[in-house]
């Protein structure tokens, strides 16, 4: 048995400083390289015990503990809790989580979602109350945090306490008992809040001290792993490395992996069986996803560790896929288990819904979870660039549900030569939240467009008056000049008198001796009216209304946001006329 590194997952709302806090500890700049400076993929870095001791200094003496853990393994996940559901990752994989909250913004939607998943997995967590340097008037210095807080003016101390206890109050509403780390009475019952600044480094020694103390004191038993056991891991990234070829970055969370071991890796179809050719371990403090990371070749690695593996036949491997090592006798059973695991995420159904694509199994799982939370149906979910088949699957939706005739692609593109027809909307983004936001905005606009289109074919409310002295023809058809009093008239608009009896329809409209399709309020035009004779069914000075069919009336009422106020008023007049004949008309 061996004591492994505790796995620490950083979680929280977008841009609250998760990666920046780690960058300060590692003296790196990963946050600057991510799209929109927002973490998109899972990274890992090995924080040695020596780094912890150097950062914390004398603070560790206050723990009064003999440190036996070999260090910490940081997992940096994108802000939303959905990313933490990667096979045995995030809430499930983490021994402890760091929930990063911007002191000036407080608890946000994604913060709540992170708390939900942490509770679901019963994962203990610490809160890094970040960006204290942005408190107006804050004086940064290199003292330890409590001394630094004490050296602030009374006004600043009060601001800090107010913000901190606003957070404590909101957490209390969620039935969570939290307190500033130096005021904690019982770490098993209270959540520690450590004020920090990723920019100046304030509070980071204290954060590492609390983290190390919790792991050492309460988790020593659960950190014991059987170093002789088969390895379990998750693919973080698939890369093409100069001089090595295709490699996979893997988080190993159980067992030990050696060179030449048989490994089974999940794919979209059958699991791959291959052998470890090379094991490359990142140097301490290096993030496995960074292109500049330096590695060393090793013969074996044990949990918990991020490692780069070179192996043959890994072309079909995708990020987020599970990996297991085994002996020949266990191959079939392990293949079955891995296949089942992948199929839990990949969706292929005949039901209505979106087609979604992503670059990794984890991203796909996150996207599915987010869409489900928003009650957005998913018809097909898969990994890779958008193909002709995906376009075809999405276009089938159009007849039944045009709003879901769409493809959402996270961190992927269209395959070469793939054309997008008008009845399919393709949205891609490398920031997952923006992708969903873009879809919601598109859906809202498209809904309005489709509703507006539907209303175009309805008989709209209008009111006209036959002008005196402008009878151009008495019948077959009657041609008269009319004044549009309210609304809009169109060709084929049926007309009725004020008694509710339909008498004719507008066959054609002329304005300034030119044929037009419609005329608006305050315009005078000539109209031809079949089946009526001036002096019999109609007379000069008569007021006529559009004869709105009952079904059209109901739809117009449903879509009244597309009607002008005057149209709404005429509609009321028309319904009043019709209800004299039938009290339940249009109801």
Image (spheres, rainbow, N blue to C red):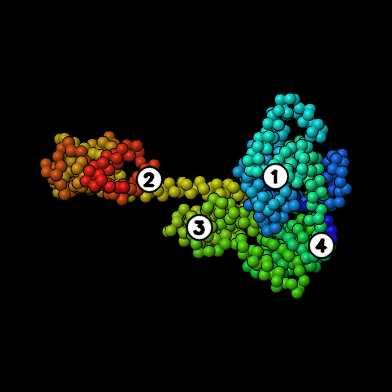
| Residue bearing mark 3 | 353
Percent across and percent down for residue 246 are 72, 61
Residue at position x 65%, y 37% in the image = 169
Contact check, label 2 and label 1, Cβ < 8 Å: no
Contact check, label 2 and label 3, Cβ < 8 Å: no
* Disc on the earlier residue, 4 or 1: 1
| Residue bearing mark 2 | 559
Q: In the rendered view, does 555 fall on the left or right side of 417?
A: left
Closer to us: mark 2 or mark 4?
A: 4
Disc 3 crowd rating (10 Å Cα; few below 14, some 14-19, many 20+) is: many
Quick check: 488 above or below 314? above
Q: In which quarter of the image is the N terminus?
A: bottom right
- Helix, strand or loop at disc 2? loop
The number of numbered badges drawn on the structure is 4
Quick check: 81 above or below 261? above
| Residue bearing mark 4 | 226
State the separation of the CA atoms marked 3 and 4.
45 Å
| Residue bearing mark 1 | 99
Picture quadrant of residue 270: bottom right
Percent across and percent down for residue 548 are 27, 46
């Amino acid at each position: 048995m061996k004591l492994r590194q505790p796995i620490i997952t950083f979680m929280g709302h977008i841009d609250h400083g998760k990666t920046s806090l780690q960058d300060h500890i590692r003296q790196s700049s990963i946050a600057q390289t991510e799209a929109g400076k927002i973490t998109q993929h899972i990274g890992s870095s090995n924080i040695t015990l020596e780094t912890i001791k150097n950062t914390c200094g004398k603070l560790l003496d206050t723990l009064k503990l003999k440190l036996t853990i070999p260090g910490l393994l940081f997992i940096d996940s994108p802000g939303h809790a959905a990313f933490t559901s990667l096979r045995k990752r995030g809430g499930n994989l983490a021994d402890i989580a760091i929930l990063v909250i911007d002191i000036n913004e407080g608890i946000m939607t994604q913060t709540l979602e992170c708390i939900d998943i942490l509770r679901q997995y019963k994962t203990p967590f610490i809160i890094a109350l970040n960006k204290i340097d942005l408190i107006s008037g804050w004086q940064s210095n290199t003292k330890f945090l409590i001394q630094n807080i004490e050296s602030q003016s009374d006004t600043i101390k009060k601001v800090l306490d107010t913000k901190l206890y606003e957070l404590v109050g909101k957490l209390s509403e969620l039935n969570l008992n939290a307190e500033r780390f130096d005021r904690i009475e019982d770490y098993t019952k209270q959540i520690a809040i450590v004020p920090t600044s990723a920019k100046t480094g304030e509070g980071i020694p204290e954060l590492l001290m609390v983290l190390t103390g919790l792991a050492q004191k309460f988790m020593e038993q659960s950190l014991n792993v059987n170093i002789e056991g088969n390895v379990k891991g998750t693919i973080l990234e698939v890369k093409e490395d100069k001089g090595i070829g295709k490699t996979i970055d893997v988080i190993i969370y159980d067992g030990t992996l050696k060179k030449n071991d048989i490994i089974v890796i999940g794919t979209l179809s059958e699991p791959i069986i291959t052998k470890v050719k090379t094991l490359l371990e990142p140097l301490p403090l290096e993030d496995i996803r960074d292109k500049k990371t330096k590695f060393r070749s090793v013969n074996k690695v044990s949990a918990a560790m991020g490692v780069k593996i070179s192996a043959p036949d890994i072309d079909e491997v995708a990020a987020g896929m599970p990996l297991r090592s085994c002996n020949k006798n266990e191959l079939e059973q392990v293949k079955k288990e891995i296949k089942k695991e992948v199929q839990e995420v990949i969706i292929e159904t005949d039901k209505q819904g979106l087609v979604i694509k992503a670059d990794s199994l984890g991203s796909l799982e996150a996207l599915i979870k987010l869409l489900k939370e928003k009650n957005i149906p998913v018809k097909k979910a898969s990994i890779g660039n958008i193909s002709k088949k995906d376009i075809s699957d999405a276009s089938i939706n159009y007849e039944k549900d045009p709003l879901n005739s769409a493809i959402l692609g996270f961190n992927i593109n269209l395959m070469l030569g793939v054309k997008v027809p008008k009845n399919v909307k393709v949205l891609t983004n490398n920031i997952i939240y923006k992708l969903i936001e873009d879809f919601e905005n598109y859906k809202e606009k498209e809904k309005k467009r489709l509703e507006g289109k539907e209303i175009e074919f309805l008989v709209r409310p209008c009111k006209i008056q036959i002008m005196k002295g402008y009878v151009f023809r008495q019948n077959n058809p009657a041609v008269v000049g009319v004044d549009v009093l309210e609304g809009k008239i169109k060709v084929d608009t049926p007309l009725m008198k004020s008694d509710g009896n339909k008498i004719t329809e507008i066959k054609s409209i002329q304005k300034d001796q030119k044929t037009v399709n419609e005329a608006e309020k305050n315009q005078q035009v000539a109209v031809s009216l079949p089946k009526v004779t001036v002096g019999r069914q109609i007379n000069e000075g008569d007021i006529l209304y559009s004869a709105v069919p009952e079904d059209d009336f109901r739809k117009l009422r449903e879509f009244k946001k597309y009607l002008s106020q005057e149209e709404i008023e005429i509609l009321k007049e028309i319904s009043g006329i019709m209800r004299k004949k039938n009290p339940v008309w249009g109801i």
